[in-house]
Image: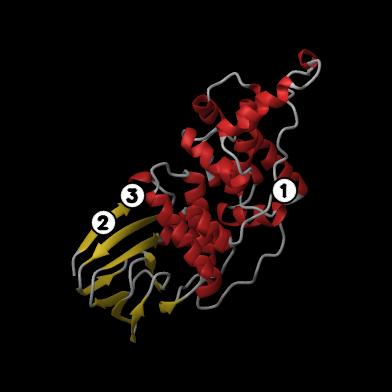
Amino acid sequence: MHFSVFRSSLERHWNGFDATIYDTTPGIDETLFSDHCVSMHLGPPVVSALHCDGARVHRVQRAGDLKIIPAGFSRLWEAQDRTRKVSIKLGRVFLQAVADSMHLPERHATIEPRLELRDPRIEHVAWALTTELEADVPAGSLYADSLGLALAAHVLGHYASEPPPRISRGLSERRLRRVLEYIGEYATRDLALAELAGVAGVSPSHFNLLFKRSTGVSVHRYVVRVRVERALRLLAEGELPVSAVALEAGFANQSHLATWMRRIVGTTPLVFRRSAESSFDRVPNRANLSDGATPNLIRLPALQEATYEEEERSLRR
């Protein structure tokens, strides 16, 4: 069996984990894994056989089928046709750090092999990382790190030898206010999950879950929302070209801004600017508008997290 790398995250320096999209030829491969590996089938159905830790599975693999091979385990894989997969490797140190930050004893941090698995949450993360690898303009380290930590916490929470107790609380009001103020001030930067967790005074592995329990949305979606709101204000002011507005608001380029504006407010930067200019012309005594004030053009929809299926469809468009 021959492996050909299609996309890889190795040069993106994700924190503690990496992902690779690869193609294979028909054949047999045996690998001893030094890191914990979560892989998902991407291509057309293919007949395959898997052997690991005395277990054997012979089946037709379809897109979305998953397997988990813990570090230190060897697996034998036979495929009868060409395949494409995404392989997500969680480093031993990274997974142990996540377990430690969750205050898990050793029995909660030992992962069991799973050769035949469907899990909507892991599938969501795997498709999202696949899209991130294929994107001409990546969403950035905050997004990737959030996905990696979410995956590690989910694997520990559901596929350990003894699953840990669930977390039901969110951030305290004081910690949440501190994080929101920090995001408001620095949203145009490429924020890192560990950076925001430090502001909150909690571990990175807990932070995204606690933030979502407190706000109803992931931290990445909240940061993007803040950036879109800043872009709308700049567009309404009409002083900068759209390309400069995108950079000033924290987006990679004009196309990146347009993508998120369509998702959040249902319009494009150019259409919004024309609407802003038309509305501003109709405002009486516009010279008396307070500094920074703009007409009330579009009321942004309430913050609401998409379901895993909706988010996946959005990311893959």
Q: Amino acid at mark 1?
A: Ala
Give the camera-side residue of 193 and 203: 193
Estimate the x, y position of residue 101 in percent, counting from the top left: 57, 58
- Kindly indicate the quadrant of the structure image that contains residue 51: bottom left
Q: Amino acid at mark 2?
A: Val
The tag on residue 302 is 1
Q: Which residue is mark 3?
A: 10
Residue 228 in view (yes/no) = yes
Answer whether labels 2 and 3 touch (C-beta < 8 Å): no
The tag on residue 41 is none
- Kindly indicate the quadrant of the structure image that contains residue 59: bottom left
Residue at x 37% of width, y 56% of height: 19
Estimate the x, y position of residue 2 in percent, counting from the top left: 18, 65
**Colour pattern:** secondary structure
User: Of the residues tagged 2 and 1, which is closer to the observer?
Assistant: 1
- Element marked by disc 1: loop
Residue at x 74% of width, y 27% of height: 295
Mark 2 or 1 closer to N-term? 2
User: Of the residues tagged 3 and 1, which is closer to the observer?
Assistant: 1
In the image, taking residue 219 as reference, residue 303 lies left or right, namely right
Give the camera-side residue of 170 and 78: 78
Q: Residues within 10 Å of mark 1 (few under 14, many from 20)?
A: few
Image position of 248 with respect to 117: above or below: above
Image position of 94 with respect to 183: above or below: below
Q: Which residue is mark 2?
A: 5
